[in-house]
Amino acid sequence: MESTIVAVSSATGAGARMIVRLTGPESLKLASGICEAPDEAAVVRRELRFDGLRVGGWVYRFVAPRSYTGQDLFEFHIPGNPILADGLVRSLVAAGARAAGPGEFTARALFTGKLDLSQAEGVAAVVSAQNRRQLRAARRLAGGELSRRLAPMTAALVHVLTLVEAGIDFADEGIVAISPADAHRELTALRGELRGLLESSERFDRIGGVPSIVLVGRPNAGKSTLLNALCGGQRAVVSSTAGTTRDVLSAQVLLNSGTVRLVDMAGIEAGRIDGGGGESAEDASGPAMIRIGRLMQKLAQQATAGAEVLVLVRDATDLREPIGLDRRPDVIVRTKTDLVGADVPGGDGTISVSAFAGWGLDRLRDRLDRAAFGEGATTAGDGALTLNARHRLAIESAGVALDRALVRVSGNESEWVAAELRVALDELGSVTGIISPDDILGRIFSTFCIGK
């Protein structure tokens, strides 16, 4: 806390601008060494002198305690060249700053009381969010929603513990601060609130990750062309020859609500991987291709079984019955509709597209988004609270301690009741950092990016 730290706090790689963040007791002195630093909180345009260069940029000054870290803090917004940002950091380190470690800016916000521990974890969750739903949940956590929900429960627990311990202290004088019946009633209500919090909250790991969308269909149905069109690049080899795809290919595709993994696998004909053109693999290529075909069939089955969303791709020019699948497809797509002159949704909910002409791709993206993230994924669940594994474990442990305390209350064992209530209080305190073992802090902040 006594040192002044510096780091690049914007995303890696080139961009419109990059941000270098400096905080600590020597911030003003070090900032004044590279520019005309403002004496008070301000946003000013300045010429920055560092690494033998003169670079125009914006300087943001935040004065303690009204800053993210609770200390004096500067942000230098410079042209988005990583080499410039690295040179600025090196110059500030040479002048006396220290390169920040992962999460050190947010750790300082915690230690100065600007954030509690659950809010600090919310900052990390915001940085790592992979879809809009997860981002909203992370922002609620960073905004202190969990702390606000736990505050009245913690206060109620402290109230009962205080009365129980008062009864122990004045037992010789015959003073009963809280009766066993009243303690049992209040602890039972508190136990119900903790249980309700867990039941009404969702786990971060259940809304995280990248959903997989698997494209399945006959050889030459247009799966690879569709994959390329959706990901905006040449990810899969496209050919008019059936059976071109011999492997399971995948690409990350950004939809409205988040990122999905789009998977293109070898074509299926009559329930098997086809070697191409309807001719058997044995006739066409011999034993080696038979082994490859069997391996591809196994991989295709695994990809289909593990798909969050299964998309059946049908060639609009192919009038045969659809292939049979072990599960009902979530989305059906008719491809090559430019060849039959049709750009209309099918009456059965089928999406008609032409990757060549660009027909129907926006409709398909919307359908895939709803299938992967749920109806109304961009707005649903705004009021729900989301907990990570550490939060749930602490709250569950507090509940177990309350269960033990309730048993002791019935036996009129005040000392044991007080001990169990302290365990419950410690567990709830660990969520927000009121009671924070160093090993917990170390694990949390090691997951942060540098400059956060």
Image: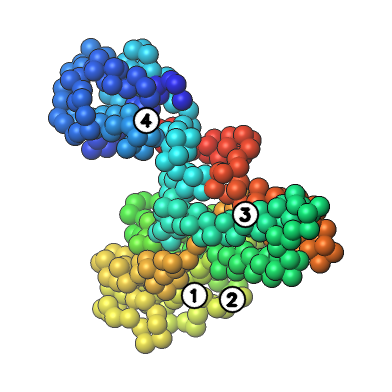
Q: What label sits on residue 151 in the rendered view?
A: none
Distance between mark 4 and mark 2 Cα atoms: 58 Å
- In the image, what residue type sits under mark 2? Arg
Residue at the image position 43 percent from the left and 67 percent from the top: 383
Cβ atoms under marks 3 and 4 closer than 8 Å = no
Q: Viewer-nearest of labels 3 and 4?
A: 3
- In the image, what residue type sits under mark 3? Val
Q: Is residue 288 left or right of residue 335?
A: right
Residue bearing the label numbered 2: 327
Q: Viewer-nearest of labels 1 and 4?
A: 4
Q: What label sits on residue 158 in the rendered view?
A: 3
Of labels 4 and 2, earlier in sequence is: 4
Distance between mark 2 and mark 1 Cα atoms: 9 Å
Q: What label sits on residue 71 in the rendered view?
A: 4
Of labels 2 and 3, earlier in sequence is: 3
Q: Nearer the viewer, residue 57 or 62?
A: 62
Residue bearing the label numbered 1: 330
Expressed as whole percent of the image width and height from the top left, the position of residue 90 reads: 35, 17
Distance between mark 1 and mark 3 Cα atoms: 51 Å
* SS for dot 4: loop
Distance between mark 2 and mark 3 Cα atoms: 54 Å
Residue at the image position 45 percent from the left and 74 percent from the top: 331
Distance between mark 3 and mark 4 Cα atoms: 32 Å
* SS for dot 1: loop
Q: Quadrant of the C terminus?
A: top left
* SS for dot 3: helix
Of labels 1 and 3, earlier in sequence is: 3
Of labels 1 and 4, earlier in sequence is: 4
- In the image, what residue type sits under mark 4? Gln
